[in-house]
């Protein structure tokens, strides 16, 4: 929502709010935020819905010089890293207790950070608002789900990530929306979703360059690794031992993880927001799907809608105001100078990064400490300890160092085992280097100006659909007759529970999310243990003539949940039947469209021909709105959607767009 890398005039929140105000014939008044860019509201790049905690405790250095001990986690890390933002012990204590996160807003919003959280932004903005607020634009959750780990092919198991996504988007997000409703009882709340940064259309060679660059391995090791991948006789053996990596395979895995996680988050967001009680829905809560399609992903070609610069710029000489250029600051890439970060906010962002001027010093010290640790030949003598302290002494004269570096330096000076103290110092320096380098390229994979226009278009469209709900438009294509009886019959044939009212059609007028849950799956016989990430059934889900998805069903698990983005303009009328092929024995099938349960049926209710089971959508549906069903997702492959209306060409969107907006699907 901050608009990473974008000038204020190009932010999708600004574009959308301006257009909505024009259409409502009202003046736009943005509640100012507490930071240095009040026109951007309270948004913050990198903000989380809620602060997370971790095991253990941390000693926090207070402004007075004293310390306080709190639980590890986001609050402790922020207070130690940005301690100069706090002017008094009372102010820092209020932050650490969660009472007031406003001091964190003094860090310029282009710098990714957890604080202020979305929860505290709501508190702060509600205290600043004068008069009733009629429109709230908000998002959140992607940072709580640690999207960097999603993109890391060697990161946490995708099943663990899916559990996190369910918690964040299925539970935490609606909780925070509930807080927004209490703060703004008269507002329409529009919650924007996320997109997959990678797609099957992302250029593999450029992704490989990206992965290798981010690995920061020496060029000779990358060259050796490439060579080994061509030696089929020993490749699998060495990869299995971990000596080399099949980067091509890791790239494919990263794409699958990105697509799967985005679809899963989309499903749970829609499912949770659709189940909000009327007291929270109030004047309205609507989900806004950005509808970034495969051709809009990173390195997907000229229609990509995200920033692609992932290499830091050269740090300018002292006194220079030019922050653009080639690689610098000790990072070298002799293969290409492409993909150096370059966006409209780069100059302001670099000027605001705390301790950016120390980056090269940090790198030099980190290399020195790392080499010393690797040498493993440091005698525990006063002289050797003194030599290390002398090396870091110039840095310690800085007045704004993070507590982590100060604590490690104190260990060096006061007798902690040398190897332990050095590792703590290496960790502290590495954390600082990572923070600064991340901030330098912070616009990477965020929407570019064209992507922001697309987001704005979808927000405006969602507002129009909510404000001007048309039953006739929602029923388009469902029935050929004009009588009420024909319409009711058509809705029932498509699985719509009319007891929920016709306004529910607003949620499923256009289908962009499909989820399939299967329970009672066949277990491995005889107690045989099979790794769920190795053996799969390759099933196929078909929803009428226009939509189909490949589904990977792991062997030996009792239930799965699969989510897919349709990546096409689909109406409820297009969903005519539900067929599942190649799944084997199962007990029950549940189908969700835009998070709404449209079908729940036992296998026996379907018509089985060979290995395909087909269901009609007018099978009675049990109402499970009272809670969130939990299903483990053991996916490893992704669904594929086919749009049979337009063949291989782009799909036109007839839902409306901003005048002048660039919609790359129709160009």
Image: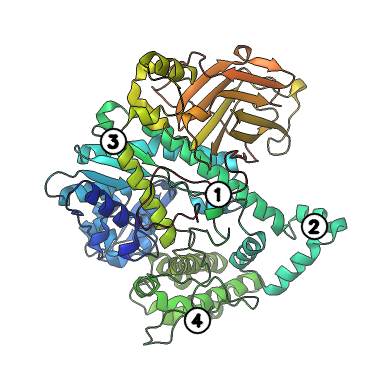
Which residue, given by chain and number where applicable, does mark 4 sit on? Answer: 391
- Of residue 577 and residue 272, the one placed in the foreground of this image is 577
**4 or 2: mark nearer the eye:** 2
Total residue callouts: 4
- Mark 4 and mark 1: Cα distance apart in space: 60 Å
Q: The N terminus lies in which quarter of the figure?
A: bottom left
Regarding residue 99, the answer to whether it shows in the image is: no
The residue at the far front in this view is: 481
Horizontal and vertical percent for residue 436?
Answer: 44, 69
Horizontal and vertical percent for residue 268?
Answer: 45, 35
Regarding residue 321, the answer to whether it shows in the image is: yes
Horizontal and vertical percent for residue 440?
Answer: 44, 70
- Mark 4 and mark 2: Cα distance apart in space: 39 Å
- Of residue 81 and residue 333, the one placed in the foreground of this image is 333
Residue at 36 percent across and 78 percent down: it is: 398
- Residues marked 4 and 1 touching at CB (< 8 Å): no
């Amino acid at each position: 929502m901050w608009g990473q890398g974008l000038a204020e005039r190009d932010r999708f929140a600004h574009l959308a709010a301006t257009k909505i105000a024009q259409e409502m014939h009202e003046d736009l008044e943005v509640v100012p935020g507490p930071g240095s860019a009040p026109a951007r509201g309270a948004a913050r790049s990198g903000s989380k819905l809620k602060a997370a905690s971790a095991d253990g405790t941390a000693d926090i250095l207070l402004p007075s010089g004293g310390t306080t001990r709190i639980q590890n986690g986001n609050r402790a890390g922020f207070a130690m890293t940005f301690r100069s933002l706090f002017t008094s012990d009372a102010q820092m204590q209020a932050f650490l207790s969660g009472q007031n996160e406003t001091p964190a807003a003094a860090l310029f919003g282009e710098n990714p950070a957890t604080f202020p959280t979305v929860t505290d932004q709501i508190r702060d903005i509600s205290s600043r608002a004068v008069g009733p607020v009629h429109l709230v634009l908000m998002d959140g959750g992607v940072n709580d789900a640690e999207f960097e780990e999603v993109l890391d092919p060697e990161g946490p198991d995708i099943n663990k990530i899916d559990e996190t996504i369910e918690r964040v988007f299925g539970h935490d997000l609606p909780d925070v929306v509930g807080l927004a409703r209490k703060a703004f009882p008269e507002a329409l709340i529009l919650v924007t979703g996320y997109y997959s940064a990678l797609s099957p259309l992302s250029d593999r060679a450029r992704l490989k360059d990206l992965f290798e660059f981010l690995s920061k391995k020496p060029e000779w090791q990358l060259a050796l690794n490439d060579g080994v991948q061509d030696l089929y006789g020993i490749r699998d053996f060495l990869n299995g031992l971990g000596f080399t990596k099949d980067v091509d395979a890791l790239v494919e895995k990263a794409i699958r993880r990105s697509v799967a996680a985005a679809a899963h988050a989309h499903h749970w967001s829609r499912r949770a927001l659709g189940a909000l009680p009327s007291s929270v829905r109030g004047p309205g809560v609507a989900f806004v799907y950005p509808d970034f399609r495969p051709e809009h992903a990173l390195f997907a070609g000229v229609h990509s809608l995200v920033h692609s610069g992932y290499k830091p710029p050269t740090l300018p000489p002292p006194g220079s105001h030019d922050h653009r250029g080639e690689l610098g600051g000790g990072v070298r890439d002799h293969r290409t100078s492409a993909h150096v970060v370059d966006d409209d906010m780069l100059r302001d962002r670099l000027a605001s990064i705390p301790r950016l001027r120390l980056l090269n010093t940090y790198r030099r010290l980190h290399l020195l400490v790392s080499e010393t640790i690797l040498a493993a030949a440091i005698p525990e003598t006063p002289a050797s300890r003194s030599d290390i302290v002398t090396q870091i002494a110039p840095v310690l004269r800085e007045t704004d160092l993070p507590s982590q570096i100060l604590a490690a330096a104190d260990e060096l000076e006061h007798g902690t085992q040398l190897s332990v103290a050095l590792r703590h110092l290496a960790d502290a320096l590495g954390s600082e280097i990572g923070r600064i380098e991340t901030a330098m390229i912070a616009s990477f994979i965020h929407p570019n100006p064209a992507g922001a226009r697309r987001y704005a278009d979808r927000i405006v469209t969602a507002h129009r659909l909510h404000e001007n709900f048309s039953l006739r438009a929602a029923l388009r294509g469902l029935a050929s007759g004009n009588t009420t009886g024909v319409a009711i019959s058509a809705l029932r044939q498509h699985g719509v529970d009319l007891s929920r009212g016709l306004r529910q059609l607003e949620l499923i007028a256009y289908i962009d999310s499909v989820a399939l849950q299967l329970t009672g799956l066949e277990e491995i016989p005889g107690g045989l243990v099979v790794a769920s990430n190795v053996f799969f059934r390759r099933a196929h889900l078909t929803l009428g003539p226009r939509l189909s998805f490949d589904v990977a069903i792991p062997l030996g698990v009792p239930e799965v949940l699969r989510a897919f983005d349709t990546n096409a303009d689909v109406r409820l009328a297009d969903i005519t039947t539900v067929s599942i092929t190649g799944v084997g024995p199962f007990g029950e099938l549940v189908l969700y469209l835009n998070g709404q349960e449209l079908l729940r049926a036992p296998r026996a209710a379907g018509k089985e021909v060979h290995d395909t089971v087909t269901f009609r959508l007018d099978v009675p549906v049990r109402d499970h709105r009272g809670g969130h069903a939990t299903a483990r997702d053991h996916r490893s492959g992704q669904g594929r959607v086919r749009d049979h209306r337009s063949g291989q060409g782009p799909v036109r969107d007839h839902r409306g767009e901003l005048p002048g907006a660039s919609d790359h699907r129709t160009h």
